């Protein structure tokens, strides 16, 4: 029923309103810029098709020399040399077995940590910050001292808090709503 009412109101006196809108004076469009005309000027078309001797002479003086790119087979040994030059260190801690389907990593480049080592280092620093200082972490894991300082400053391991199960001995807060307060018109607590 609501749609019928809105349709009646919308269509009421529609012809007169349409004629009134059509008969209104329209705003005049802004004049177009003279350079934005769609037809090209005749002088430009002639210049394009003319032969320009000085430009042609300069084009003949240009000499291009190209060489073939280095084949991929020669580029690979360079990468292998770089990998051999980086110093690596043996892992201090690793996951037992192959739990997540990853291949077991035995060594990492100096200045880098594995995930297990990073978590172990952060946990040691959290438990004993006086013993496991950023300097000791840098020395222990072959890290840059500023990286070790940033590691201890900006990262921290998660805290696992185990909430004990509810027993009858633990005191619980009860709801303080009382039926008499509602009757007297006082708001509930």
Image: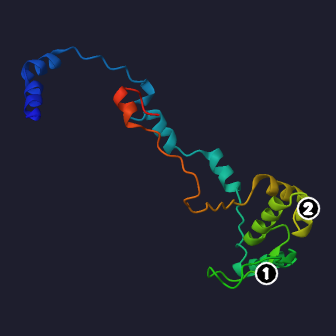
Q: Earlier in the sequence, mark 1 or mark 2?
A: 1
Q: Which quadrant of the structure image shows residue 149?
A: bottom right
Q: Residue at x 7, y 22 (%)?
A: 12
- At mark 2, the secondary structure is loop
Q: Residue at x 30, y 17 (%)?
A: 28
Q: Are marks 1 and 2 in contact (CB under 8 Å)?
A: no
- Quarter placement of the N terminus: top left
Please rate how many residues cluster around mark 1, counting C-alpha atoms within 10 Å: few if below 14, some from 14 to 19, many from 20: few
Could you say where residue 36 lies in the image, as x and y percent from the top left?
A: 42, 30
Q: Residue at x 48, y 36 (%)?
A: 44
What's the mark number on residue 14? none
Q: Which residue is mark 2?
A: 131
Could you say where residue 127 lies in the image, as x and y percent from the top left?
A: 82, 61
Visible residue check, residue 150: yes
Visible residue check, residue 38: no
Q: Which residue is mark 1?
A: 77
Q: Residue at x 74, y 80 (%)?
A: 105
Of marks 1 and 2, the one in the foreground:
2
> Is 66 on the left or on the right of 14, as rendered?
right
Is 9 above or below relative to 145?
A: above
Residue 14 or residue 123, whichever sits in front: 123
Q: Which quadrant of the structure image shows residue 140?
A: bottom right
Q: Distance of mark 1 from mark 2, alpha carbons?
A: 44 Å
Is 100 above or below relative to 49?
A: below
- At mark 1, the secondary structure is helix
Please rate how many residues cluster around mark 2, counting C-alpha atoms within 10 Å: few if below 14, some from 14 to 19, many from 20: few
Could you say where residue 110 lies in the image, as x and y percent from the top left?
A: 86, 71
């Amino acid at each position: 029923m609501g749609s019928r009412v809105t349709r009646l109101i919308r269509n009421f006196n529609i012809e007169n309103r349409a004629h009134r809108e059509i008969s209104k004076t329209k705003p005049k469009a802004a004049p177009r810029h003279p350079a934005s005309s769609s037809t090209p000027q005749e002088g430009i078309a002639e210049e394009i098709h003319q032969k320009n001797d000085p430009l042609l002479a300069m084009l003949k003086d240009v000499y291009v020399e190209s060489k073939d790119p280095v084949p991929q087979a020669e580029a690979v040994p360079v990468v292998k040399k770089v990998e051999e030059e980086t110093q690596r260190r043996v892992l201090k801690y690793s996951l037992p077995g192959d739990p997540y389907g990853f291949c077991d990593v035995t060594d990492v480049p100096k200045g880098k940590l594995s995930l297990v080592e990073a978590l172990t280092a952060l946990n040691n620093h959290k438990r004993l910050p006086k013993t496991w200082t950023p300097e000791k972490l840098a020395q222990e894991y072959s890290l840059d001292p500023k990286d070790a300082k940033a590691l201890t400053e900006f990262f921290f391991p998660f805290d696992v808090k185990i909430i004990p199960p509810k027993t009858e001995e633990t005191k619980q807060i009860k709801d303080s709503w009382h039926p008499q307060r509602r009757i007297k018109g006082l708001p509930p607590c």
